[in-house]
Image: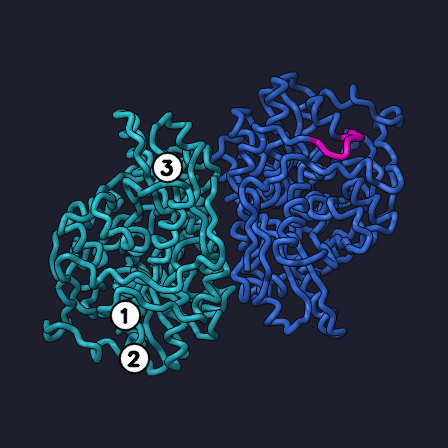
Chain colours: A cyan, B blue
Amino acid sequence: MRFNLADEKLPTAWFNVLPRLAEPMAPPLHPGTREPVGPDDLTPLFPMALIEQEMSPSPWIDIPGEVLDVLRLWRPTPLVRAVRLEKALGTSARIYYKDESGSPAGSHKPNTAVAQAFYNHAEGIKRLTTETGAGQWGTALAFACAQYGIECKVYMVRTSFDSKPYRRVIMETWGAQCVPSPVDDPSSPGSLGLAITDAVRDAATRPDSHYALGSVLNHVLLHQTVIGLETREQLAMAGETRPDVLIAPCGGGSNLGGLALPFVEDADVRLVAVEPSSCPTLTEGRFDYDFGDSAGMTPLLPMYTLGHDFMPPTIHAGGLRYHGDAPIISHLVKTGRMEAIAYPQGKVFEAARMFANVEGRLAAPEAAHGIRAAIDEALAAKETGEERVIVFNFCGHGFLDLAAYDDFNHGRLVDA
Amino acid sequence: MRFNLADEKLPTAWFNVLPRLAEPMAPPLHPGTREPVGPDDLTPLFPMALIEQEMSPSPWIDIPGEVLDVLRLWRPTPLVRAVRLEKALGTSARIYYKDESGSPAGSHKPNTAVAQAFYNHAEGIKRLTTETGAGQWGTALAFACAQYGIECKVYMVRTSFDSKPYRRVIMETWGAQCVPSPVDDPSSPGSLGLAITDAVRDAATRPDSHYALGSVLNHVLLHQTVIGLETREQLAMAGETRPDVLIAPCGGGSNLGGLALPFVEDADVRLVAVEPSSCPTLTEGRFDYDFGDSAGMTPLLPMYTLGHDFMPPTIHAGGLRYHGDAPIISHLVKTGRMEAIAYPQGKVFEAARMFANVEGRLAAPEAAHGIRAAIDEALAAKETGEERVIVFNFCGHGFLDLAAYDDFNHGRLVDA
């Protein structure tokens, strides 16, 4: 059962969680001086509009019409009630998923890519650099840059570059250039931290270029709040007064933030982050200042971290292989507003296969983490006979991640 | 701009074109006796419900509730106005596409796969065999069989099996078995005709098994008419009194039939079939009785054909590599109700890349044929300043066909 919002219900303002936080967040620090970062420190990498959004006290920020025009290609996205999954589980819970997989790039990532490309274009920037893990973000930025005629260079984590050539092909189809990272060590499998270093170094040394980040930063999560804003409207369409629990996979935190932040003030709605056991930032990391990249070029961010030199194993959910987490997400977990849970990938793929069978949707390995947690919430509700309303973010499809399914189907998946 | 039908507007009956044809179609003939085929000749391969549909005089045929329950996972599908494409072309035409790419298998094929699996299941069949070219149909049948707990074996044209391993992985994820065809000649690249022979032979020699075909036959086109029925409603939502021209790629004819058949009686609506120049069945074939497969095991069908021993080149639009065409489509072309046009694949991929850039949608190579023709219709309307209303079927996404885009992007595509 799908709940489609009318086109005119596309949100026209983003929800800014910063002025709504019960406790203020600690500021990012300059990597050299260890003093709070000011706007001037960020101008070599970001346009002023995004720097302002990063620190804005406004509760709502208008979405420019030129951004809405592009978002309308696939938004609003459907909220789907997973009736056949409920039946297969025999649960008393009602399970909904927000389907972000129908975007051009096949994930939630274009929601912010389009906004970032627009603001850079508006300030005269001709070229953007970025990193990408599994390829979802690089694909999204390539699409967004094509909309505004901006050049795009993507540094892709080498292990994904080698195992997912199709991601490169999509980026190239949209006119971007994609190279494996780290650029100076072909023997390294790479990591998001290393690729960020490559991309930041490139942008910082070219005056025509800026850098774009696909997660972690406040303005990225801000742009993703269209997900949660639409979900709230759609739950009302479905006759639900409120969700009991909102669930999303968490790598850097952008799809989770997008779904959850608009519900932060609804005290009785549980918010759940799901991460891989092999990269357990929220569940086993420490809360501290740390660099966003491996080389220590970025500002120090107050976040849960496994250490900026942490090298995660090459699990299939490449988008969740990050040593840190968004400061906003970290803050919510630290202050007890958000829960975190971790799963090994074997249990994640079990859930993904079940979902593919009963709901027909092939999930990206990242998205499958949300499915796993939603199923377990539904089974818990079944135990107690509760009518729990569960919503999870189906943040991307798996058509480009089939090697992972092949490994799982043939018993070759390492259950890390 | 997207036009979403409400869930309750999902058609509940299929549109049967047979009783509406101005001239009756010639009957299929038995391959041995060359007499018209009767229901008994087909019972080793098909359930009685489908045999009846193949010859039914009823203008409407109810869709079973168990089929609707599964179709609702992704239907109704959106009709999208390609505003950004119109702008890029500077055309006075209005261009719409029916987006069938959002199904579980990523194409229109599940529309009939689900119905076929259901009817076989209802008559106690435990196992289905089929062939697949590019893999779209095999994927769809694997999904459908998973819904009813039927075993599924897919014979995949070897050249696609080798070049598109991801298709096999999806089929296996849904529990199907997929093997390369022809099974008895590993040196042959294979063809749809040869794969049909393999699948029919398998089903004919096992009492627990039936055979399922993804295109060509009347009941297959019947099941696809949900596409055109929804499109009619959605055009009305968009404020269009009628389309001027309906366009769809044509391999066996199922996605074209699905879009076009409900408009056959609207005399002022042009219907256009688009095929590859390298397999020009409608544009250069002869109208004659011919076998559906290569070995001559199937009934003789009255259709345009390149000869059942025709071996098409290994172009990227594997789903359009078929020597024949649906008898219904052939009949409409022969009687002048439908036009046909052929394009070399270079021009097709040019259109696909433009579409990916401005509308954000990555088309399957098959679907890209429709885009090419729609663009040319829009450019023709621009010449004359006409307000032409153009609708094409976006019958599948290209996330599993990226090797083709890679060849095109790097100038390696043979422009056959």
Residue B61: % across, % down: 70, 31
Comes first in the chain, label 3 or label 2: 3
Callout in the foreground (2, 1): 1
Badge count: 3
Residue A185 in sight here? no
- Quadrant location, the C terminus of chain B: bottom right
Residue at label 1? A53
Tell me if A97 is positioned left or right of B68 in this view: left
Disc 3 designates what residue?
Answer: A95
Which residue has dot 2 on it?
A205
In this orientation, which residue lies closer to the viewer: B364 or A220? A220
Q: Is residue A323 above or below residue B201?
A: below
Disc 3: which chain? Answer: A
Distance from disc 3 to disc 2, alpha carbons, whole Å, reads 48 Å
Q: Is residue B303 above or below residue A167?
A: above
Residue occupying the point 59% across, 33% down: B114
Mark pair 1, 3: CA separation:
34 Å
Ranked by sequence position, the earlier of labels 1 and 3 is 1
Q: Earlier in the sequence, mark 2 or mark 1?
A: 1
Q: Where are the magenta residues, as a range?
A: B54-61
